[in-house]
Image (cartoon, rainbow, N blue to C red):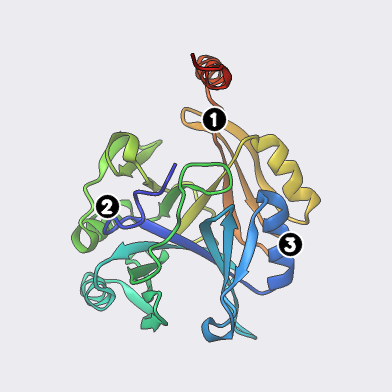
């Protein structure tokens, strides 16, 4: 579907990968998802746009040489004023990792760490508004905050970004809220305090859509990545937790094929369109 979410203030509008091995990551993601790439040129540090057909779906840049940071995907939230968002975030307990900067004529960005330790970005759009598709194979299908401070995280994002969380579950075993109403849900917040290994901090997690999670997980291994958690099926689909060859974590999420009845209707419509008129 087209991405009506890209300009919704406070909601995810983009995701990009910072990698220590640009050529290897480029080969991995283009082969796994069938993406093509567009190099933005030296003016933008040779930042790469991953594309699905004519649609921008994600980005990628190189880690600074000698950077101690792990390779990782970053989720960006849409804002109307990056400087104001940074000031509000700082006042609410966030740490600023990269001060607001203008990216040519594309927009203005900053990188922060929320009060529970999860890094994220903010994006103030100018010419570039974010991903062009959402919820399709080869595009982002979900963004999820796995946090060790569930209540603090909800308070922070509600205060700074105007979230109106909807509680999906509130038990000691599974505590989860969603962002976006009904079929427009675009992100979730998971109370991961009792689930994350001690060495894993709070983090935003990107879900990328595939038509067959089992097949895609096998391809991840063939391309040098790692399957951290084998495919599992839950209420909302089939998923697999994986990393790319340099360790950047993401989730494969199933994208349903049209139901049989819908396919039949589409086929009948196509046949009718081929009939002569008159």
In-image side of 261 versus 21 (left or right): left
Q: What residue is drawn where x is 52% and y is 81%?
A: 44
- Label 2 sits on residue: 151
Residue 238 appearing in the image? yes
Per the image, label 3 sits on a secondary structure element best described as: helix
Location of residue 228 in the rendering, given as x and y in whole percent from the top left corner: 66, 48
Label 2: few (<14), some or many (≥20) within 10 Å? few
- State how far apart marks 2 and 3 are (Cα): 40 Å
Instruction: Compare marks 2 and 1 and give the one earlier in the sequence.
Output: 2
Per the image, label 1 sits on a secondary structure element best described as: loop
Tell me the quarter of the picture where residue 64 sits. bottom right
- State how far apart marks 2 and 1 are (Cα): 33 Å
From the viewer's side, name the closer residue of 228 and 18: 18
In-image side of 45 versus 169 (left or right): right
- Which dot, 2 or 3, sits closer to the camera? 3
- State how far apart marks 3 and 1 are (Cα): 26 Å
- Label 1 sits on residue: 256
Label 3: few (<14), some or many (≥20) within 10 Å? few
In-image side of 168 versus 3 (left or right): left
- Label 3 sits on residue: 27
């Amino acid at each position: 579907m087209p991405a009506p979410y890209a300009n919704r203030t406070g909601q995810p509008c983009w995701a990009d990968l910072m990698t220590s091995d640009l050529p290897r990551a480029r080969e991995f993601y283009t082969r796994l998802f069938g993406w093509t790439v567009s190099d933005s040129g030296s003016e933008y540090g040779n930042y790469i746009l991953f594309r699905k057909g004519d649609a921008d779906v994600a980005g990628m840049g190189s880690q600074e040489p000698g950077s101690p940071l792990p390779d990782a995907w970053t989720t960006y939230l849409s804002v109307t004023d990056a400087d104001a968002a940074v000031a509000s975030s700082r006042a609410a307990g966030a740490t600023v990792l990269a001060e607001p900067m203008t990216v040519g004529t594309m927009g203005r960005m900053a990188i922060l760490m929320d009060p529970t330790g999860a890094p994220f970005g903010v994006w103030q759009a100018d010419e570039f508004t974010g991903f062009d598709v959402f919820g399709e194979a080869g595009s982002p299908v979900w963004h999820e905050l796995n946090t060790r401070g569930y209540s603090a995280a909800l308070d922070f994002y509600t205060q700074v970004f105007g979230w109106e969380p909807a509680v999906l579950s509130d038990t000691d075993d599974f505590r989860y809220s969603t962002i976006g109403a009904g079929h427009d849900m675009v992100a979730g917040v998971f109370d991961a305090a009792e689930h994350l290994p001690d060495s894993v901090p709070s983090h935003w997690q990107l879900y990328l859509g595939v038509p067959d999670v089992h097949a895609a997980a096998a391809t991840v291994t063939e391309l040098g990545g790692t399957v951290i958690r084998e495919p599992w099926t839950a209420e909302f689909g089939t998923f697999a937790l994986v990393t790319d060859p340099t360790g950047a974590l993401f989730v494969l999420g199933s994208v349903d094929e049209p139901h049989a009845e819908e396919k039949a209707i589409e086929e009948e419509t196509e046949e009718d369109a081929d009939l002569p008129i008159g």
